Image (spheres, helix red, strand yellow):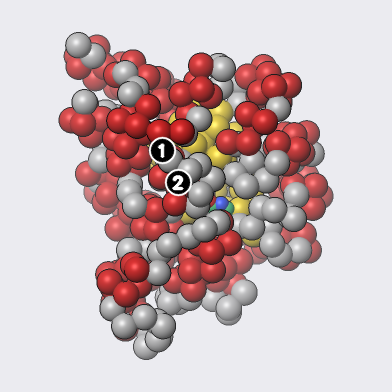
């Protein structure tokens, strides 16, 4: 089963590039930028990765991102992740980045974007991994700040496929960003948002009805509301579920109690993703391997999850069809 998962063609749809920052790379970039990290060693830093909730994690995640200054830093971060994709048979990745994490501390939008974009272009050529870029607004900041970010992104709008909404969920409902989502959609961006990770099911209703999202990041708390589940199924909207993240942030107490299988049984379209792999204990394949074991998923279940990852990607129809064909060929050869 483990080899079946490792070799399975798949896409990753929920990934924060700042969350792929491995401690070793963080220390080396900090050194070349002459920036202090408040930890003596990689081991000491890793020991701090103990989270009781989303906010505990975010505090450390933003601190780690502080050492990213030059376009080359963003390039190195992104390329290192894309090399891991190639190793894991992740054929396609939809990468979120948080421009405000960097612009707030004086790093230009252009610097951030150019580094990430160049790495994506090189990865297509050298690693044969395709990518799309998602720009996420930080929900703990104001809608006005999100509007500023939207303006800064416009020179690159042909290279940014979608917008997202992340950071501290509780107390920052989707309704806070209704106008900036409308304006972003007007500019041609596809709307996505984190919803129902720590926030109540009401936040998912808002994300659907007010922000018009076409895919839900996390969405675990949809299960609190039967009518909401029906609505998500009816609208054929997928959830980007992140099992190891859910355990690390105590959204779920134990992987054995993860609702992923129940979600599938209810007809929800589920995908498996790593979220912030450097912080949550595993890349996407590790997420598949551990959730398979915890819930005793079959090869057919795993195939369905990978199928959803291509089907509910933001790729055009033709490219989806090519990846789905590759996946089907693989499954037909290895299902027994
Ligand atoms: N939730 C909200 N914001 C985030 C996350 C997450 O899981 N990861 C990075 N920013
Ligand atoms: Zn996330």
Q: Residue at x 55, y 32 (%)?
A: 239
Q: Quadrant of the C terminus?
A: top left
State how far apart marks 1 and 2 are (Cα). 7 Å
User: Cβ(mark 1) to ligand 1 < 8 Å?
Assistant: no
Q: Crowding at label 1, few (<14), some or many (≥20) Cα neighbours within 10 Å?
A: some
Q: Residue at x 68, y 18 (%)?
A: 230
Tell me, for residue 292, which label it has, or none.
Answer: none
Q: Crowding at label 2, few (<14), some or many (≥20) Cα neighbours within 10 Å?
A: many
Foreground pick, 270 / 55 = 55
Image position, residue 158 (x, y; %): 57, 48
Foreground pick, 58 / 20 = 58
Q: Residue at x 62, y 47 (%)?
A: 198
Q: Is residue 161 above or below residue 117?
A: above
Looking at the rendered structure, the secondary structure element under dot 1 is helix
Q: Quadrant of the N terminus?
A: top left
Question: Horizontally, is 281 left or right of 3 in the view?
Answer: right
Tell me if I can see residue 183 in this picture.
no
User: What number of labels is visible?
Assistant: 2
Foreground pick, 29 / 276 = 276
Tell me, for residue 247, which label it has, or none.
Answer: 2
Foreground pick, 153 / 155 = 153
Tell me if I can see residue 88 in this picture.
yes
Tell me, for residue 255, which label it has, or none.
Answer: 1
Looking at the rendered structure, the secondary structure element under dot 2 is helix
């Amino acid at each position: 089963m483990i080899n079946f998962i490792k070799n399975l063609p798949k896409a990753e749809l929920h990934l924060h590039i700042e969350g792929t920052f491995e401690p070793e790379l963080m220390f080396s970039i900090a050194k070349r930028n002459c920036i202090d990290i408040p930890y003596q060693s990689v081991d000491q830093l890793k020991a701090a990765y103990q989270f009781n909730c989303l906010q505990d994690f975010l505090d450390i995640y933003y601190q780690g991102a502080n050492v990213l200054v030059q376009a080359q830093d963003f390039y190195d971060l992104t390329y290192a992740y894309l090399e891991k994709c190639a190793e894991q048979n992740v054929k396609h990745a939809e990468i979120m980045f948080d421009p405000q994490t960097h612009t707030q501390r004086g790093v230009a939008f252009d610097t951030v974007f150019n580094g990430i974009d160049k790495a994506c272009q090189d990865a297509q050529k050298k690693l044969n991994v395709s990518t799309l870029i998602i720009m996420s607004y930080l929900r703990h900041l104001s809608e006005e700040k999100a509007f500023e970010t939207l303006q800064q992104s416009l020179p690159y709008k042909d290279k940014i496929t979608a917008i997202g909404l992340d950071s501290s969920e509780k107390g920052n409902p989707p309704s806070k960003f209704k106008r900036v989502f409308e304006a972003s959609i007007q500019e041609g961006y596809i709307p996505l948002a984190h919803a129902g990770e720590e926030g109540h099911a009401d936040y998912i209703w808002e994300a659907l009805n007010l922000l018009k999202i076409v895919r839900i990041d996390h969405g675990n708390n949809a299960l609190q509301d039967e009518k909401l589940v029906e609505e998500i199924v009816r609208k054929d909207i997928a959830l980007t579920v992140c099992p190891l993240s859910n355990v690390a942030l105590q959204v779920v107490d134990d992987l054995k109690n993860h609702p992923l299988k129940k979600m599938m049984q209810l007809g929800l379209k589920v995908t498996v993703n790593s979220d912030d792999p450097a912080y949550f204990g595993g890349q996407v394949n590790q997420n598949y391997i551990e959730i398979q074991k915890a819930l005793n998923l079959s090869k057919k279940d795993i195939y369905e999850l990978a199928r959803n990852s291509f089907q509910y990607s933001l790729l055009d129809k033709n490219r989806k069809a090519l990846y789905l064909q590759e996946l089907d060929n693989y499954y037909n050869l290895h299902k027994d």
